[in-house]
Image: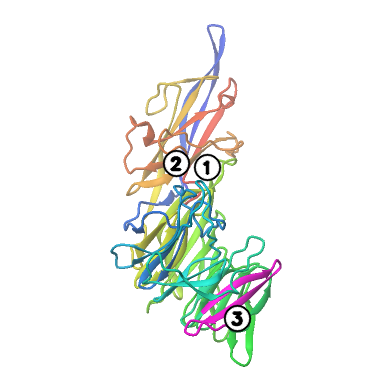
Amino acid sequence: MFLTQFAQRRHLFLVSGFFLLLLLVVVSALRQDPHTAVAAPQETPTTMVAEDVTSYTLAHPRLIWRTASQCDELPSLLNQVSDTAVPEDPELISRLFVTGGNSRVIWSKNDPRPPGSCNPYKFLSNVVGDGNYVYWADESGLVRQSVEANAQDEPEVVSTAVKSTHNGNKVLLALSDDHIYALIYPTPISAQILRFSKSTLTADPAYSILGYGTQLAADEDGVYWLFSGSLWRATYEQGTGWDAASIATGVTSFASSDFYLYIARGNNIVRYNKVDGSTTTPLYTSSSPNAPNIYNVVHSQSATGELFFLESRESKACPDCFIEYTQVLFRMGPNGGPFVPLYTKASPLIINVFNLQAADGYVYWQEDDTIQRLTQNADALPQTNITIERIEVTQGTQDINNNVPLIGGRRTFVRVFGLSAGADVPNVTAYLYRVNPATLEPIGDPLVPMNSQGGTHNVVHPVHVPLLLDNSFVYELPLSWVQTGQPLRLKAVVNPFNN
């Protein structure tokens, strides 16, 4: 729901031989329920690592992260190369105790090479870890490094079989308590899942799959992956081998707990029973109309069993503008019920909040090249109503009631004054439409703000100061909207995406 306000201008007469459009402003309003928006957070996330994080893993009681050189060959959503990286940079793996303190580099690689040349070391997988080791894949295969290692220590090779990549696909790694799982590509059209014992480093026979797997994960009940939106689970028993089956389709993310799998399917989340194979009706369905997509789900690993998930919502400042993403972190109980937003971030072009992980009362995520943390019991973000107090249409001078007449064919500016019903609400936009005076239907595309600070977005305050230009949404009307003999009516919509 939203509040709209209209300004109507008309009347034509002749002055000094020139046809002018004197736009006598008459303001009317159609009042409906105001839009709500997420205000500034009550609890601010803690920055655990402030820069240069390419990817990370939570290896209790430590955070482990990789810092890539500029020429990293496997960029992806979960593989962010710092803007400050240069070819001469080393490849690094660092650690930090979740309780704080100083970070420590436990592996570094920076072989000699000509100036400006890329680091020759090839990093071919994600990083995973536990309380003892960090694992990744390079050209020698699957390797591991002790969490107590020094930067100059060479990693131990676990298996030379884990090194095949085809068609740009990297190796995917996942850990359970006792095993290491690797998804590799021995041929361009097929993949294999390998399983190694952590204690003996021996391998079980490979399990072959067609196509390309994503989102590899593992627990004591088996190994999971996505293939073309289908969620698969495979288990291995000595003597009988592998047993695999598809669990669900249309899957965008999933998380495992002791007895259940929580499965995100675009705009909703269901729960799958690992024992009897039953699936619930949706525990959560997004209310957003803006292409919602639940792209990351994690279980709290706590006795209360909360679920945390990231939902992206698309928006455009104008029909021809690039897509912007609003990413919202939610908390929900294990059986559904109330769900509350904890954190939100808007970003252009890409999703830059990802890789949720949880342990010991905290939820962690990567945001650009940083690692952030928030308590699992954080207060919900306040939802604040926003209304439009008034619209001001001016060609240089105007009063609060729009009594100063306007002239057709002259540059015309509009200020839309929004008010929040509580705290300041950042990152809000507003659309200004030209509408048909008879039907009130929009004519063409809306205008977006052109504020000097924030551009298309603004901060909506509980009180506005008219003398401050950026205390309003500012627009310039096209001259085609302000022509002699053409009635003009405007409609403003604040927070059109209800983010």
The local crowd at label 3, few if under 14, some if 14 to 19, many if 20 or more residues have their Cα within 10 Å, is some
Amino acid type of the residue tagged 2 in the rendering: His
Residue contact at pointers 3 and 1, CB within 8 angstroms:
no
Residue 8 x/y as whole percent: 51, 30
The front one of 380 and 308 is 308
> Against 493, is 245 above or below?
below
User: Residues under labels 3 and 1: Cα distance?
Assistant: 44 Å
Amino acid type of the residue tagged 3 in the rendering: Ala
Residue contact at pointers 1 and 2, CB within 8 angstroms:
yes
Residue at x 59%, y 42% (from the top left corner): 319
Q: In terms of secondary structure, where does tag 1 sit? A: loop
Mark earlier in primary sequence (1, 2): 1
Residue 130 x/y as whole percent: 42, 75
Amino acid type of the residue tagged 1 in the rendering: Ala
Assess whether residue 45 is covered by the magenta stretch: no
The local crowd at label 1, few if under 14, some if 14 to 19, many if 20 or more residues have their Cα within 10 Å, is many
Q: Which residue is mark 3?
A: 234
Part of the protein shown in magenta: 180-203
Q: Nearer the viewer, mark 3 or mark 2?
A: 3
